[in-house]
Image (cartoon, rainbow, N blue to C red):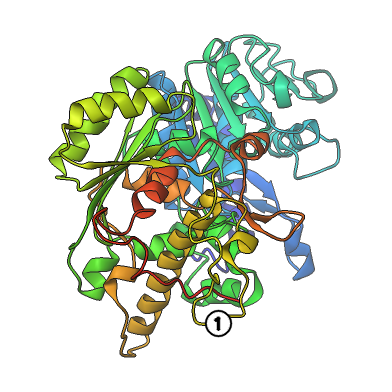
Amino acid sequence: MDYRNPDYSAVFAQRYQRLLKLRADPTLLAAAKIHYRHHPWDFVRDWGQTFDPRKIETGGLANIPFLPWERQVEYMQWVVQRWQASQRGLVEKSRDCGVTWLSVGLAVALWCFHDGIAIGFGSRKEALVDKLGDPDSIFEKVRHFLSNLPREFLPPGFVFKEHATYMRLMSPETGSSITGESGDNIGRGGRKALYFIDEAAFLERQQMVDAALSQTTNCQIDISTFNGSGNLFYTKQQRFFGTERHFVFDWRSDPRKDDAWYQQQLDEQPEEIVAQEIDRDPLASNTDSFIPAKWVRAAVDAHKRLGFEPEGIRTAGFDPADTGDAKATVLRHGSVVTGADEKKDGDITAALPWAYLLADDHRADVFVYDGDGMGAPVIKMDLERRSANRFHMVEYRGGGEVRDKDRPSDRSDPRSRRNRDRYQNFRAQSWTWLRERFRRTYEALERVEQGRVINVDPAKLISIDSRCSAARELQSELPRPMRVFTDSGKIAVESKKAMRARGVTSPNLADALVMAFSEHELPDRRAYESFEPDFET
C-alpha cells in the first residue's frame, strides 16, 4: 500500500464488490460479523471512513477510506488487550498520528458487535467532545464513521436522529452505548467497559478525574502529547514506561513521513513545538525554564562524551520536602552526579537515616541539607548525631543572603552589578551557578559535535550519570522552575506556590541537586574561590 499516494478509487471499488458478495450471501455476512467481533481492527480497515478537510486544499477527497497502517492496527489490538485484561493504559503520541479516529473506529466496531458494552470518551472541554458540524469533535467523528457504514452492520431499528444524539450513541437492539463527558464531569456517569481520555495531559484537574474513573471503569486509556512534566499524565508515563500498559506513537511509524518531512517541520516551526508535538519531549514546553530542557538532556553522561572522570569533592544534597512529598537525596563526585534517589513513603524521621546511609555509602565529604524548613533543627541534631563527624554538615539557607554579596556578579567585569543587586536570595544565586554548569556543558558538547577543539575545565561542567536510579525523574524536574525577575530587577527562582498554581509538582530532586552543587570545596579551604561563573549579559 502506498500510503503517501493511495488509490482511493480502487479501495472504494473493492469495498463495493465485497459488499455485493455479503448482500448476496447471508451466511457469509453472518460469518463476517463473527470475525469482526473478534477482530474489530479488520472492520475499521474494511469499512471505515474518515474526514480530512486538508485534502480539499490539494484537490482531493475529504471523505476518504480509513486505511490504518501497521502501527495503527497494533494500537487497536493493544487497546483490546487492555480491555480484555481489565488494565489501564497510556498512549504517548506524536501529533497527527490519527489516534482519535482510531479510537472512534474501534469504539464503533465494538459497539456494533458486542451486546451491552458501554464505552466512554472524555476531553477537557465539552466542544472537543461534541460540537455539531465540527469534524474535530469526537462525536462528530463518531457520527461520520457510523453514517458511512453499510446498513447491514447497523443494529435493527437504529435511527440516527433517535439513537445518535448529542454526546450519546445507543443501540436499540443490544443496549450498547458510547457516551461523552468533559472537564470535571469525566467519570461521573455510569460504569464503562472502556474509557478513552483524549489529550489527558491537558486536563485541568487530572487527579480528580482519575479518582472518579477509578470507580467507573477498569480500562482507562489516557491519550496525549506531553504538556510538561509536572502533571499526572507524565507521572503515569514514567510508571508505565517499558511495560505492556505503555503505547508509543512515534512519527517514524507513519509511512507518510520521512526525514525530509521532519526537516521541513524543523525549518517551519519553533524548536520547542517540534520537540513537544513531534519528538514527544515532555520537557520542551518549559521555554522560560531556569535550566532549559535541552541543556539538561545534553548533560546526561556528558563526562563520557567529553572524556573526564569523577574526581574531587564528594557531596550529598538532601531535601526533606514538604509533608506528603517525596524526600530526595542527590550525590555528586566532583562534576558528576553519581546518585539520585527518592523516598516516597514515611516522614522525615524515616527519611533521615535513609539519606545518611546514602551519603555514608557515597563516602561524602560534605552533607548539605535544607535549613529553611521548620524541621531544620531536628535534621541538624539527628544527622550530627548519626554522622559522628564522618562528614561536614552544611545548612542550605536558600531564603537567606547571597554569598559574597558585595562582589561583582561577573568577576571579569568589575563594573557589573554586585551579587546583592543581582540575586533575590541565595536560592537564586545557587540555581544560577548550576545553570552556568549546564550551559557550559551544552556548549562544550556542541563544539565537540562540530569537530572543534574544546578547552574547558571539567570542574566547571556537570554530568548526570544515567545509571542513577532516579535519573529520569531528575531530568524531568530540572526544567520545571521558571527564572523570574523581581520588581527591582533581581533574578529569582519561581516559588513552589506559583508552581503549584500552574499544576506543577515540587522539584525536590532538582532542589537536592542545587544543594549538592552549592558547596564547591571542602570546609578547610576557602569556598568558591576557584569557581568564577562567566554569566551571560
**Is 148 left, or right, of 307 in this rendering?**
right
**Is 23 left, or right, of 447 in this rendering?**
right
Disc 1 marks which residue?
413
Q: Specify the quadrant of the image occupied by residue 369.
A: top left
Residue shown at 71% from the left, 22% from the top: 184
393 up-or-down from 333: above or below: above
**Is 31 left, or right, of 344 in this rendering?**
right
Within 10 Å of disc 1 (Cα), the crowding (few <14, some 14-19, many 20+) is few
Q: 49 or 255: which is nearer to us?
A: 255
Q: 126 or 304: which is nearer to us?
A: 304
Q: Position of residue 10 (x, y in %)?
A: 59, 60
Residue shown at 54% from the left, 10% from the top: 215
Residue shown at 26% from the left, 49% from the top: 315
**Is 367 left, or right, of 189 in this rendering?**
left
Residue type, label 1 = Asp
Which secondary structure lies at badge 1?
loop
Work out whether residue 325 can be spotted: yes
Work out whether residue 344 can be spotted: no
Count of marks, rendered view = 1
Q: Position of residue 124 (x, y in %)?
A: 71, 33
Residue shown at 68% from the left, 32% from the top: 204
Q: 422 or 66: which is nearer to us?
A: 422
Image quadrant occupied by the C terminus: bottom right
